[in-house]
Structures are given as C-alpha cells and as structure tokens.
Amino acid sequence: MDTVEKYRRYVTTSAFAAVEPITIASARGATVTATDGTEYTDLYSGIGVVNAGHVPPKVAEAAKRQIDKIVHSCSYVYHVPVVADLAERLAEVTPGRLQKTFFGNSGAEAVEGALRLARAFTGRREIIALQGSFHGRTAGALAVTGNALRKHRGGAQIAGIAFAPTPNPYRCRMCLGTCSLACADAVEDVIRYDTSDDVAAFIIEPIIGEGGIIPLPAGYLGRVKEILDARGILLIIDEVQSGFGRSGRMFAAEAYDIEPDIMTLAKGIASGFPLGAFIAREEIADAFEPGDHMSTFGGNPVSCAAGVATIDMLVEERLPQRAARIGSAVMVRLDAFAAESGLVGDVRGAGLMIGVELVRNRVTKEPAVTEAAAVKRHCRERGVLIGVGGAHGNVVRIQPPLVIGEEELDRAIGVIEEAVTSLSAQPVG
C-alpha cells in the first residue's frame, strides 16, 4: 500500500480541499524532492515555516546534539539550559522591552496564551481583532479570527470579541482616493460602540497573512497605538507568520516604529521543529500566577535547540537583509508584469512575503478564485510549489525559504508569470 492510499485510509484529510498529489521524500534548502525523483522549487516554505531553508545543517546538527542529551523533561517543572538560552536570544532580537517568553507548541497556542496574559495583566476581558485576520484554529484563536473561510463550521463567535475594519488599501471602502487612515480611527469607534469598555488588548498581524498578505498602511499602527495607550489597552503583535526574517526584517513590526506589549511567535522560529511562543514586557509577563497557564510539551529541548540555531543562522548569514534585497527585486518585476496583465489586480508584501491578488476585472475587482487555483496547479506541474490564500481565495502567496538561490527564484517567478499569462484573456482595465 503506497503513501497516498494510506493517507486516504488512515489520515483525516477531509478538513482540507485537497492534499497536493506529491509524496515528499526529502527536502534541502528551497528544493523539495518527491519519491519519484521530481524536484520542486518551494515558494511556500511549508506555509511560511522553513525560513532558514529545509533541513539547514547547523539547525539539524544542534537538534541532533540535543537529542543525545534529553528530549523531554517538561521545561516548566525543571530548569533546562537550552530553554533559557532561547528565551535570552528572543529577548535580544525582539523589539522594544519584550523580555520574558512562554513556550508552547504552535502559533495558535501562542495566541491563546497571549490573550490570557493580557487579560491577567489588565484585569479586563474583551479583545479587539481585525476583520480579515487569522490567528489559528483552536477555539480561542478562531474567536479572534475575522475570516469566514477559516472559521467555517468551527469558529462560533465568543462573547467579548469585537472586530475593526481591515486596513487593506486595495479594497478600502472608507477613504476616497487618498488614504486618511480612517480604518485606524475606526478602532476608537469599535471601542466606543462595540465593546463594554472592558478591553484588555488589540491583536493584529503586522502583515495580514492568511487574509491576503496585506502590509499595514504607513501610520496605521502608530495611530492605533495612541488610541490604545490612552485607554490602557495592550497591543499584541502576531508575528507567527511574518517573523524571523520573512518580511525583510527580523520582525515585521520593526517597520512601523511602535513597541508591542506582547508578541506571538511560531512558524519560522525553529526551522520546522514544533514550537510556539509569546514574549512580553517583564511586568506584563509577571502577571501570571501559579496555575494560570501551562504547556506539557512547551519549551521542548530539541525544538529550543533548533530555535537557538535558527536565530544564530538568521543573524550570522543576514537572512532578513537578504530577504529584503531579493524580495524588493521580485516586487519590481511583478509590478511590471501586473501592468501588462489584466488578471493581476494588486502586488504587495515585504521581503519574501509577497501576495499577488488575481481579479477577473480590474475595475470591479471580482476575485479570480478558480484562476488562482489553476495558477497553483500550473506551477506545480512545472516544478514550482506556491500557496493560494486571501479572504476570497484569490491571492497567490510567494513565501520561499530565505536561502533560495536568486537564479532559482527568478525561474520560479517566471513560471508564475507564465501561468497567469496562460489564463489571462481579458484586456488591461
């Protein structure tokens, strides 16, 4: 019985539209190799996870060394050196006064913990999030997710959650012509009219990932932070997808000149080893009391060893800066391509976190959903793996490992352009 048949019989896949018809044998750098020997250029990084590449040697070696020492002891019952080492490194590389970290196993777990910490510190219960956001698939994380495609049949609204408008310049319904940051001012209205004035925190992705790779408009977070600070509301920055060099900076929040109160981390933190975390200012972190929070597998020593090695690699090899440089070149190329393609409505992103929104009409901006799926299929058949997301499912996601070769990336972008061109039958409008 082959792997595909075993998946069909024994793995629950009904929650997914489809599992790609590829059986992976191995992966290195930005290349994935299937069991039939076919090689693919990975522009999706396992959903934005392997920022330092597939199986980076330094990270793999660090994990192997740790395995020979101890695999598990529960890092919240005993002191484990590598856990302390990673927490120290995170305090060094994260922005502002973020200092103390709690480790879990995933981004959703990090979000749940961050929300709980915010409530413990402020003594308040309500949370504000964004329409179009995504923060995970556990009950609490889905509650602050403003994306119907992700909440379907599992994301019932929980009392005490309010949503502010998505700051999406391409589909803005609030400003006429010139951006006036009305979406930022709307956060104040949400507090006044949609809450009971018992708001603990506002959670936001600095680049809205699953919602369509949407960088926040310049000035947005600064204005929102003023609104929050005036009311003693904490700012939780969700860097699960945008962190660890992905945006061209170590953390995307650095581009906005604000200081988070709490930050959630996962995905790129440990090069594919299961690990999530939230980090906060010392006085906020210390709001937890015994019994308030726990994670049996959180701070797993092997994952933490991989995390330390991943951060070292990102810093020593200047991978965030590399992502900024080559990502900028990709954006310039795609902008030029978009000007000639009637199917491309918008190109946006930062570093190597790039979204290409496909539309059937550039005036009405009707989402090109089936076309996006066709582009994904076309690319896979020509040896390139991409993601598709967005609130409508019409955004091509380009998120390769930050170590990808420039020639390899150039060829892969050419395949995407070829795919879009083959589907585009409408005039530029």
Image (tube, rainbow, N blue to C red):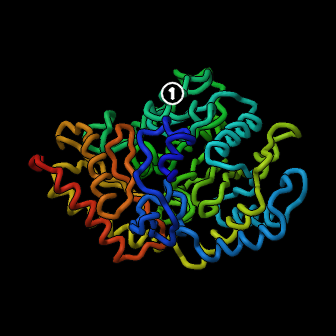
Residue position for label 1: 190
**How many labels sit on residues?**
1
Q: Is 40 positioned to the left or the right of 223 in the image?
A: left
- At which x and y percent is residue 102? 75, 51
Q: Residue at x 58, y 70 (%)?
A: 55
Q: Residue at x 62, y 24 (%)?
A: 160
User: For mark 1, does the 10 Å Cα neighbourhood hold few (<14), some (14 to 19), or many (20 or more) residues?
Assistant: some
Q: Is 121 positioned to the left or the right of 16 in the image?
A: right
- At which x and y percent is residue 413? 30, 65
Which element carries disc 1, helix, strand or loop? Answer: helix
Q: Is 256 positioned to the left or the right of 277 in the image?
A: left
Q: Residue at x 66, y 46 (%)?
A: 110
Is residue 351 visible to us here? no
- Mark 1 residue type: Val
Question: Quarter-wise, where is residue 211 in the image?
Answer: top left
In the displayed structure, would residue 350 be above or below residue 149? Answer: below
The residue positioned farthest toward the left in the image shown: 427
